Amino acid sequence: MCGIAGVYHINNASVVLRDMLHALQNRGTDATGVVTFAGGEHYMFHSPKKVSAALSPAVLAELPGKCGIGHNRYPTASNSKQSTNIQPIVLQVGAEVLTIAHNGNFTNIAELEAGPLKGTAFFSQSDTERFFRLIAKHYQSDTFLVSIEKALGQMKGSCSAVMMRSQELIAIRDASANRPLYWGKLGRGYVVASETCALDDIGVFEHNEIPPGTILSFSPRGIATTTLAKTPEHRCSFEHLYFANPTSYINGIQTADFRRTVGRALNQEHGIATDLIVAVPDSSTFIGEGYHAEKAWGLYDQSIIIRKHDTGRTFIMPGQDERIKAVERKFSFRTDRIAGKSITVIDDSVVRSTTSYGITQSLRERGATAIHWRIAGPRIVNPCHYGINTPERDELVAASKSNPEIARTLGADSVEFLSLARFKQVIDEAGVAPSKCCFTCMGDPYW
């Protein structure tokens, strides 16, 4: 899962990209990259830091131009510490400089390396580079847009991407629609981003979802649309629960409202009477509001667990040691409100259980008499192959343990998950057919 952004024909493109990437920081914290074009030249900056630390005024001053693309890195398919894996990727093709930033994950890289890309010298481990190299290979004999279309037809997996050359910004969304992508008009130019929140933050309030299986080209000739061959859609359902910014619309669904609705459904299935109810901040806050609004099984008190916002999202950190250390410093607890109380803890999901275990132990140490976890997402039982770095099955706590066993693992009194059937029903009622969504991590088949 990454955040991507593109800017075309807008003054101070790098500043606009900085603001958009800052809004998309929820999608990746591992690295930041920007490439701009001006006067026939490209200007590149990569950093292993978050946006606010990486893109200082001094850095932005060295990234001139009205066009460019940017990327927040969330590592899935390559070493997160290797600088050559940071995007956007730049490639010289003949006399032309091309650059790409990608959100998603390709699943047939080994097949491509043994076939059409055999003998290619790669400079990174990135699956994005393999896609880029395939485009460049086709570009030797086809037009640029046809080259993208042909290359995408050879890839398996998920792809939302932005590409740039000196006079053109290209937005790509594959037919699976697994990863979101939106565009809007800003002044006389155009912007593209993974989520609508990034458009809102720069004053673009009219959002256009790039349809599944579409390539949009923004150039001096205007906007050109290429429609790809249709295949079944597999829109990611986990976007709604965890990744998306609460202010964003994803697949036409308002994220915060959706989470409140899921919270209500969770209460209907697994409500329990306790003294206090608290949601794990921040992605579960609206879920907790919905849970309590459905039926007040206890006092809703969000002051019990406070997140320290100088830390990142534990789930998307690349190593287990880093995740454990992050849990220890990620939250503050209201000890005076916890002692002697039974508590329902609301969360969006349980993956490895690292965060859940840490919170449970912290609540026990502060005198909680009972701790009941209520999880708004169905059990995560399969690794995702399409752009979310969920671990293999042996690290997924719900893949091998029953709910009582998970409760014992956490040191909790009980754990209950929203059923997959009910989760699908909530998505259906929100306006997206479940048949067009991906629930593979929750037990449905791979596609």
Image (tube, rainbow, N blue to C red):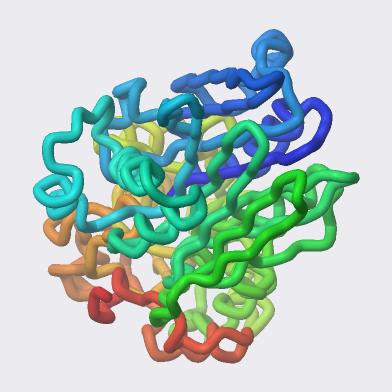
Q: Percent position (x, y) of residue 130? A: 28, 43
Residue at 84% x, 47% y: name it: 186
Q: Percent position (x, y) of residue 193? A: 64, 50
- In front here: 182 or 196? 182
Asked if residue 277 lies left or right of residue 325, the reply is: right
- In front here: 156 or 135? 135
Q: Percent position (x, y) of residue 319? A: 27, 35
Residue at 88% x, 45% y: name it: 188
Quadrant for the C terminus, please. bottom left
- In front here: 311 or 403? 311
Q: Percent position (x, y) of residue 55? A: 63, 20
Residue at 39% x, 90% y: name it: 421
Asked if residue 77 lies left or right of residue 249, the reply is: left
Q: Quadrant of residue 292?
A: bottom right
Residue at 34% x, 64% y: name it: 153
* Numbered circles on residues, count: 0
Query: Is residue 435 at least partly visible in the picture?
Result: yes
Image height check: is 173 above or below 38?
below
Query: Is residue 127 at least partly visible in the picture?
Result: no
Image height check: is 284 above or below 415?
above
Asked if residue 1 lies left or right of residue 391, the reply is: right
Asked if residue 66 lies left or right of residue 429, the reply is: right
Q: Quadrant of residue 6?
A: top right
Q: Residue furthest right?
A: 187
Q: Residue furthest top?
A: 58
